[in-house]
Image (cartoon, rainbow, N blue to C red):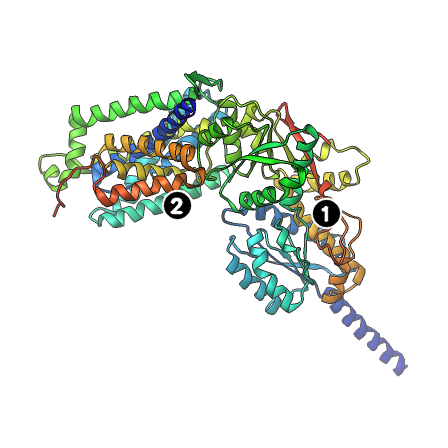
Amino acid sequence: MLEQFLQFLVTGVTVGSLYALVGLGFALIYNASDVVNFAQGEFVMLGAMTAIALLGAGLPLPLAAIAATLAAILVGLLLERFAIEPAQGASVVTTIIITIGAAIFLRGVALLLWGKDFHALPSFSGDAPIRLGGATVLPQSLWVLGVTVLLVGLVRAFFNRTLLGKALLACSFNRAAAQLVGINVRVMLRLAYGLSAGLGAIAGILIAPITFSSYEAGVMLGLKGFSAAIVGGIGNPMGAVAGGVLLGLLEALGAGLISSGYKDAIAFLFVLMVLFFEPTGLFGHKAAERV
Amino acid sequence: MKTIWKNLLTLLFLMGVGIAQAAEPIKIGSFLTVTGPASFLGDPELRTLQMMVEDINAKGGVKGRKIELIHYDTGGNAREAVNFVKRLIKNDHVDLIIGGTTSGDTLAVIPDVEKEGIPFISLAAAVEITEPTKKWVFKVAPTDRMAVIRIFEDMRQRGLAKIALITGDGGFDKSGREQILKLAPQYGITLVADESYGNKDTDMTAQLTKIRATDAQAILNFGFGQAPAIVTKNIKQLGIALPLYHSHGVASKAFIDLAGAAAEGARLPAAALVVADQLPDNDPQKPVLLAYKRQYEARHGPVSTFGGHGYDSLMIAKAALERVGNPDKAKVRDEIEKTQGFVGTAGVFNMTPENHMGLGPDAFKLVEIRNGAWKIIN
């Protein structure tokens, strides 16, 4: 029984860190612009699919991964420049709808490029499971966990320690004031989209060996990542990470201890409860509405 | 002299009428799911229908009359399917309908088809389509029940009586699960676990950990898409060494590519089309399968069993039309019902007034994955 429970925990943390990585991207753009970028899941898909395509074209895996991340960053920048920027001054809701449109567009392009089939990336360090007490874990899961921790640390340091990060945060707190103190809001926005596209792509490449990828793989991951971000308090990168791990644990424990048929219901019930009792999320700013 | 001219004119006139009549095409209507989630089923079906119609027409059509294919895409929406079938019957005046990629689409249009009285050949799998038998409705796809029977027969042979079941949350998974629960007692099989997962889930180790704790002798995963590949990998990850069975839903090269080495030794029922090359030369299906495969792959890339359903339905219809000689609905229906020994891609069809599908359980071959390829077991 203890062995089983340990396996559920391992499963939960692994799945949770996937959600956390996607949630992190949501938090980044929200921080810069108050916009929920619904194309975040598509960045994840683009990273994975581009890496798979480049690997298929004969590039070694590390090179394919780096090139795919750069490609996704480029897409993020283009999206900001040609879809978000022209709508400058539009309401947040309008911008969110634009991101939904962008997501559908990106999915369509991926469908044309790579077809409807699922594709897999080979595991980075083999498929032999590693035993942890009574539980087993895949080497790839350790990659996901490790890189998640690393990226979370980097994002945290970026916002807390660097001028650029603080400038980005300033844009979200008060765009006009940020502009007045000499922050180039336009550049900051591009930075946010580029960064979160890169984060998403890295997440996609890391999880492609475990979950596979297809043109519509971003939809589900985007939804789970978004849930993670709002549970943790949207706009709080660390909250998104905590929310992701929490969601993953709930799903695994729900499936293992209660019923696999109800595991999504359990997770979503939890999200609803959080929103009901803590509308700003578990770790969100308790700030008043900006006017 | 005058009479000769008159006769000549009459002859010319009659010839003209004759030509006009010969040019009048036989209209076959189809409604398929070419877009949307089930497009991987409907897309090869439509391509096959178009390819075969072209081929038949190039060879002179049916008794000198060309076939015209009128097609609508339902996008997997059953209400649209009903609208399109009404349009096919009332506006397009088709002589026969082929279609219904999904069981949902097919079941929704049956009332209209029965009321209007038009021969209808469905490409979907559900048992309910032809059971109970409906006067105008036929089907060419094998049912999930036949797949389950094939799996259970093999389990019985290997002496596996305690089975852990794990299925997805899609319609295919659910209807397969129903058949499994219904048939298990007949084969002396007890289900010691009955787990489920979402078809877009990324990890099933929690469910499989529960299965590991039972005294199951084998695992049966009834599903399709990428999820069964994840299940297969998770089983290896957890170090579960039980025999693994899948459904016919994963009988594609893509599954082997995704699951990789973890899929070795897994068994599943597969349509003969998947293993056409391995069939013994005296198998009556072999030439049909290889010919269809060659023709389709020359134009569109790898064949799928679903495209094969398109082939079977059109060829059964063509044979019936040829026997009648004209597209008289009632007579064509009677002739479809008399289809005997028709060798198609899904198997050999023997229809009767009680059986409007006409396939036996031997339509599925039981295959094992060995060295990254299918191997026929029996």
Q: In which quadrant of the rendered view does residue B172 lie?
A: top right
Q: Residues within 10 Å of mark 2 (few under 14, many from 20)?
A: some
Could you confirm whether marks 2 and 1 are on the same chain?
Answer: no
Residue identifier under label 1: B359
Q: Is residue A267 left or right of residue A27?
A: right
Q: Amino acid at mark 1?
A: Leu
Where does residue B144 sit, x and y in percent of width and height? 62, 44
Q: Nearer the viewer, residue B103 or A273?
A: A273
Where does residue B276 sit, x and y in percent of width and height? 71, 35
Q: Secondary structure at mark 1?
A: loop
The nearer-to-camera label among 2 and 1 is 1
Where does residue B174 sit, x and y in percent of width and height? 54, 45
Q: In which quadrant of the rendered view does residue A103 lie?
A: top left
Q: Is residue B128 left or right of residue B344?
A: left
Q: Residues within 10 Å of mark 1 (few under 14, many from 20)?
A: many
Rounded to the nearest whole Å, what is the CA distance between mark 2 and mark 1? 42 Å
